[in-house]
Image (cartoon, grey):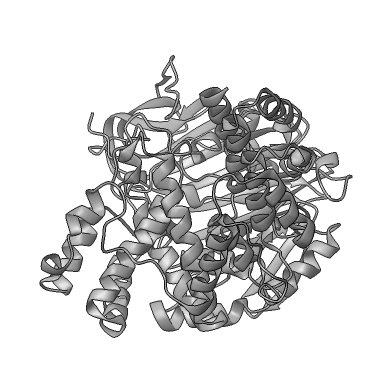
């Protein structure tokens, strides 16, 4: 066997899947999806075909042409990272039909009870498939190397509606014939066409990696914010919808600027879904339907920077994709660069520089986090036997950004912009590795390898000496004020009068990791940082409070950890509590996780469990 991805059972000698047709029955009572997946391969194949799955029960595998059963077996000992291998014996077929059911513990799915939603009356479910979780929704070759088109027939309760990372075709009544194979499997007869059920149809006509498969089902409403953009959220959350529409009203201008920089927007729609607070990421770049945490709605339009990042993925990440997670920087480094170029045009150079400064501080913090695991500080790194969720960090984003910026600084922006457009046009709808990029770079910018140490940047540990710490008046002033705090001087109200969340975030990130408790409390007494509506500010302050042994803030820490499930906030707060050294902090970490665990997405649950097992 020759794997093409350390996180997949997919064999490089096997034909890859090119299309998936899914029929899905969502059972909210059991948190199970009963489904069938028709996989079409790039060519006919004879032999054992390996597929990825996780916590999926296979009822049967059929030849779609003859409807005869195909022999298959499922590995008895699941791999703790890759999941369970399904091996189907083919005899010249170019397609196969799998009938299956998911598990209530499917790692990509979070099922929310009505009480966990805004409406308190309707349930909700959503997906998060990146990096390797699509396999818990349907059996597949779950690697970015296998780009697929797909169509979906989704059977849901009539009181709910569905959105997907795909074009919506129609909403209609169920038809009995389409459920034939499901009812032969584990779905009871007559359920598909019950009076309280409806079918939503979707189609994705462009090639995407499986991790971009996404849907959400709930009582959804929307607001129009542009010719290509709607903002969706729970219809009962009218305040969230209104606030999101205001926060993201500049989205169309960002799309236009993106097109000027990187070429045509290829995905037709750029809709936004604001998810419940348990969503584990800031945003997820699902094509046509970006998923967002409600914590990006800040009331000052700075949350639109997350939208700028997800928009930039429309070119770098979604059009051109890393071939596997060892080359994740190709997605995130380029996208962070593209995001900041969009922000620079739409919100100004100072705002983009602040963004770079926060990233620079974050990158330096990651070097400290991985000082005992330097492999994780490389752009191109080995991940055999490594769970990508455990090593998720700012390194591919910020060191990747620094590398892309280093190339731009060497050749000049005009030359680099031409190169970037050619790069995107050349590799769009393809999945590539670092070496492919470097060869393209050297071919199109001759002699670049003599000016920049490409090997050091991509395969060296740490931060190269020719990285760039940002320079601007506001950035320098904030760093200076942070230095003064170390000498006991607090910034005056006049000095911070025009600060937004990003200025405060940069300031707090540059303070010592721990300070005198009286200093921390005096800072909060003057500026009420623990009560900030901006979670970047609130969490940065609470981190400082924990490490400074300000136990007066434990109540606010607990409240915050129970209010949101975004890993950007869970990771530092749980880590600070677990590393604080005191019994009280460790006990609080265990208690809060025990009480909040079920409100977190399965991916976030796993991350917090690994933090607590490491330090407690």
Q: Residue furthest front?
A: 487
Q: Nearer the viewer, residue 48 or 318?
A: 318
**Hey, which quadrant is residue 178 in on the image?**
top right
Query: Depth check: 193 or 80 in front?
Result: 80
- Could you tell me which residue is drawn at 76 percent across and 36 percent down? 28
Residue 171 lies in quadrant: bottom right
| Position above or below: 408 against 561 | below
**Quick check: can you spot residue 172?**
no
Q: For this view, does 325 lie left or right of residue 154?
A: left
Looking at the image, residue 18 sits to the left or right of residue 543; the answer is left
In the displayed structure, 349 sits above or below 533; it is: below
Residue at 46% from the left image edge and 39% from the top image edge: 132
| Percent x, y of residue 555 | 80, 39
For the N terminus, which image quadrant? Answer: top left
Give percent across and percent down for residue 292: 64, 57
Is 323 situated left or right of 550 in this image? left
What count of labels does the image hold? 0
Residue 55 lies, in percent from the top left, at: 55, 26
Residue 425, placed above or below residue 260: above
Q: Position of residue 425 (x, y in %)?
A: 31, 73
Which quadrant of the rendered structure holds the C terminus? top right
Residue closer to the observer: 201 or 512: 512
Residue 138 visible in this rendered orientation of the protein:
yes
């Amino acid at each position: 066997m020759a794997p093409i991805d350390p996180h997949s059972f997919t064999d490089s000698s096997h034909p890859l899947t090119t299309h998936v047709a899914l029929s899905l029955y969502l059972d909210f009572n059991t948190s199970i999806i009963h489904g069938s997946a028709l996989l079409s391969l790039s060519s006919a194949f004879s032999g054992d075909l390996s597929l990825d799955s996780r916590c999926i029960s296979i009822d049967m595998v059929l030849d779609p042409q003859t409807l005869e059963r195909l022999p298959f077996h499922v590995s008895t000992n699941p791999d703790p990272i890759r999941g369970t291998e399904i091996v189907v014996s083919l005899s010249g077929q170019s397609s196969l039909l799998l009938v299956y059911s998911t598990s209530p513990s499917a790692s990509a799915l979070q099922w929310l009870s009505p009480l966990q939603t805004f409406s308190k009356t309707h349930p909700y479910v959503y997906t998060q498939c990146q990096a390797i979780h699509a396999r818990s929704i349907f059996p597949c070759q779950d690697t970015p190397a296998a780009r697929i088109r797909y169509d979906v027939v989704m059977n849901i309760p009539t009181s709910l509606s569905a959105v997907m990372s795909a074009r919506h075709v129609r909403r209609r009544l169920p038809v009995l014939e389409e459920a034939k194979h499901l009812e032969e499997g584990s779905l009871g007869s007559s359920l598909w066409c019950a009076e309280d059920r409806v079918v939503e149809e979707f189609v994705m006509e462009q090639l995407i990696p499986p991790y971009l498969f996404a849907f959400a089902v709930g009582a959804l409403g929307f607001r129009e914010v542009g010719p290509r953009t709607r903002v969706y959220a729970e219809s009962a959350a009218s305040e969230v919808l209104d606030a999101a529409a205001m926060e993201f009203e500049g989205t169309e201008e960002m799309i236009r600027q993106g097109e000027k920089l990187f070429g045509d927007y290829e995905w037709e729609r750029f809709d936004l879904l604001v998810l419940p607070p348990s969503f584990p990421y800031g945003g997820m770049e699902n094509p046509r339907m970006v998923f967002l945490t409600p914590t990006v709605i800040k009331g000052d339009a700075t949350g639109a920077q997350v939208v700028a990042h997800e928009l930039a993925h429309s070119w770098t990440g979604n059009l051109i994709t890393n071939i596997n997670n060892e080359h994740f920087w190709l997605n995130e480094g380029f996208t962070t660069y593209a995001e900041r170029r969009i922000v620079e045009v739409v919100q100004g150079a100072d705002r983009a520089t602040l963004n770079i400064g926060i990233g620079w501080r974050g990158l330096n913090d990651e070097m400290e986090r991985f000082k005992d695991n330097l492999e994780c500080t490389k752009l191109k790194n080995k991940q055999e036997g490594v769970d990508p969720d455990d090593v998720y960090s700012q390194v591919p984003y910020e060191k990747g950004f620094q590398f892309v910026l280093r190339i731009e600084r060497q050749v000049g922006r005009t030359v680099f912009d031409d190169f970037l457009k050619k790069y995107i046009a050349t590799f769009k709808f393809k999945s590539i590795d670092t070496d492919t990029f470097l060869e393209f770079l050297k071919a199109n910018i001759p002699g670049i390898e003599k000016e920049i140490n490409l090997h050091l940047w991509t395969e060296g540990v740490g931060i190269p000496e020719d990285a760039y710490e940002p320079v601007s008046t506001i950035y320098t002033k904030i760093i200076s004020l942070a230095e003064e705090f170390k000498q006991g001087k607090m910034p005056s109200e006049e000095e911070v009068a025009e600060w937004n969340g990003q200025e405060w975030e940069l300031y707090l990130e540059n303070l010592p990791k721990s300070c005198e408790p009286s200093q921390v409390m005096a800072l909060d007494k003057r500026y009420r940082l623990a009560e900030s509506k901006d979670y970047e500010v609130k969490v940065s302050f609470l981190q400082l409070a924990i490490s400074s042994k300000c136990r007066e803030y434990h109540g606010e820490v607990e409240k915050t950890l129970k209010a949101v499930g975004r890993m950007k906030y869970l990771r530092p707060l749980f880590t600070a509590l677990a590393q604080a050294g005191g019994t009280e902090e460790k006990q609080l970490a265990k208690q809060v996780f025990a009480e909040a665990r079920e409100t977190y997405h399965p991916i976030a649950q796993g991350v917090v469990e690994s933090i607590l097992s490491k330090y407690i």
